[in-house]
Amino acid sequence: MKYRFLLLVALTTIFSSCYMNKSFLSPTKTIGRTKLTLRDTLVTFIDSISYQPIFTKSGKETISYPFTVESVVFKSSNGHKLNGWILKPKNFKPTVTLINFHGNGGMLLTQFEGMTPLVEKGFQVFMFDYSGFGYSEGTAERKFVLEDGLSAIDYVKSNPTFANTKLVVYGQSFGGHLATVAGTLLQDKIDALVTEGAFSSHDDIAGQGFWTIMARLTVKEMYAAKKYVKDFKKPILIIHSTEDETIPFKMAKKLYENANEPKELYEIKGKHIMGTVFYSKEISEKIMKMIQ
């Protein structure tokens, strides 16, 4: 009986390790598809070469936004070609570029509406898909997405399109954790960091619930935001809902406690990473104040 128990523990540990380490990334891969339907009223046609999107109502009438969307392809340091979108206001000359690190699932089309409220406030946004997401090459692995994040910052920094604008990395959920690490490593190339609904480390978020101890033993940390943020010397704004049921608010407090001044913890209400939708005015003002 003792050996059966030990075997069960060993098998469970192996399964948990594989499951937890793969569950951090849930990409939607769309290579080869030229028509994407986010919902019945938003059908998007994608150019097969440039991946330029055309947004339509139910596949018929073209949607006109108060901003332009330009698709670009750039190369990550891991060799994968990544797809990015540049969202630029039509009626404002942007002075700030937000480099958006999106969450662990979906792809650009499923994520971009979360950033459009800030574009409408006058920000220019560069968002990109990690390896294995959307039209980006490769497989979705944590070692690759960090390289992708670093390459995205390098791409923006060296691209004339973003010249003469302040560069702020804005990470949401999984992307908030990733942005903290990438932003710290390349802090000499950016002006500030914003996280929304970010977790403090992989083992912290994996260790929620019944399997807490086992998850902490089996998850490969690789890199932890709560450690890297201690070395970040630029302004940081940490946004988190006290009602967040996906990533506990206590993780925002942990990041804030480990961060250096100047820093701010902005407590909001509502579901996970809905701050840009319901608090776009307040967040915009805080970003502008932070970088002035």
Image (cartoon, rainbow, N blue to C red):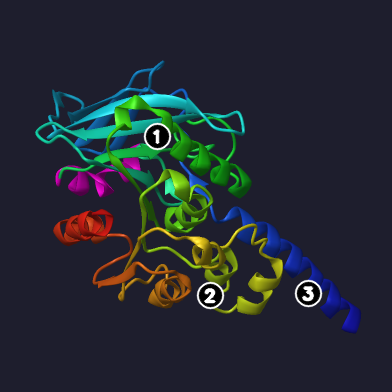
- Residue 174 point in image, percent of width and height: 46, 56
Label 3: which secondary element: helix
**Residue under circle 1?**
156
- x and y percent of residue 113 in the render? 25, 45
Q: Which residues are magenta?
A: 109-121
Residue at the bottom extreme?
A: 2
Sequence-first disc among 1 and 3: 3
Identity of the amino acid at label 2? Gln
Q: Nearer the viewer, mark 1 or mark 2?
A: 1
**Can the viewer see residue 120 in this picture?**
yes
Write down the residue under mark 3: 9
Q: Amino acid at mark 3?
A: Val
The residue that appears at 15% across and 34% down in the rendered structure is 93
- Distance between mark 1 and mark 3 Cα atoms: 47 Å
Q: Is residue 146 above or below residue 89?
A: below
Residue on which the image places disc 2: 208
Q: Which of the two residues, 26 or 253, is positioned nearer the viewer here?
A: 253
The answer to whether residue 217 is magenta is no
